[in-house]
Image (spheres, grey):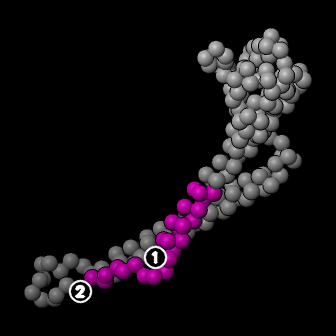
Amino acid sequence: MKLDFAHHKLHMIVLIMCFLYAGASLVFFITNYSNFQRAEDMESRMRDVNQTPDFSNMSGIFPPPPRPEFREDRMARVARNTMITSLIGCIVSILAGISILDLVRKKEKRELTKSIIESMTTPEEKKVISALEDAGGELTQAQIVDKVRLTKVKAHRIIKHLEQMKIITKYPYGVTNKIVLEKISEKNGK
């Protein structure tokens, strides 16, 4: 299904901003990670160069030089925390963008279904659907007859036709039937 960008302009702007932020965060993370790795490699090489030869065979003559202790300085901790934050921001932005896209698609599908139903139903069928929407999506067949002011036969035919179109579902309910509206309407919050 193709999305209508003009109809969901604000959603699309937020969606694009989420993906742009995710891309920028990912680029920032990769750049910082590669710089961090290069700095660690360079420091490792510097430590290897500064090592003195093995004096184990001359243990009594010269004491071994003290090894420099590597302590992670404050800038390295800040860089690591910034990288982690940018990676988390990237993941959250991607997930937010995907969820917005999913919500927009579901809304488009509901609107499309509603417009198809509008074009394929008769005025009496629309009255039955409207009565079901107003009642929260459920009514008995007897209540539909009373609310829409139809004969029992006419109500039965309309309900049967709507059930064939999968707009409603009919369940036995005592001596009558319970009619349940499927999830097509924004009015009933489904």
The reply to whether residue 105 is in sight is no
- In the picture, the disc for residue 77 is 1
Question: x and y percent of residue 139 in the render?
Answer: 70, 27
- Answer with left or right where residue 91 lies relative to residue 134: left
Amino acid found under the numbered disc labelled 2? Pro
SS for dot 1: helix
Q: Nearer the viewer, residue 129 or 46?
A: 129
Magenta run includes residue 83: yes
> Which residue is painted at 35% across and 79% down in the image?
70
Res. 100 mark:
none
User: In the image, is residue 88 above or below residue 110?
Assistant: below
Secondary structure at badge 2 equals: loop
Residue at (69% x, 38% y) in the render: 190
> In the shown orientation, is residue 77 left or right of residue 151?
left
What type is the residue that disc 1 sits on? Arg
> In this view, which residue lies farthest toward the left?
60
Q: Which residue is mark 2?
A: 65
Residue extent of the magenta highlight: 66-93
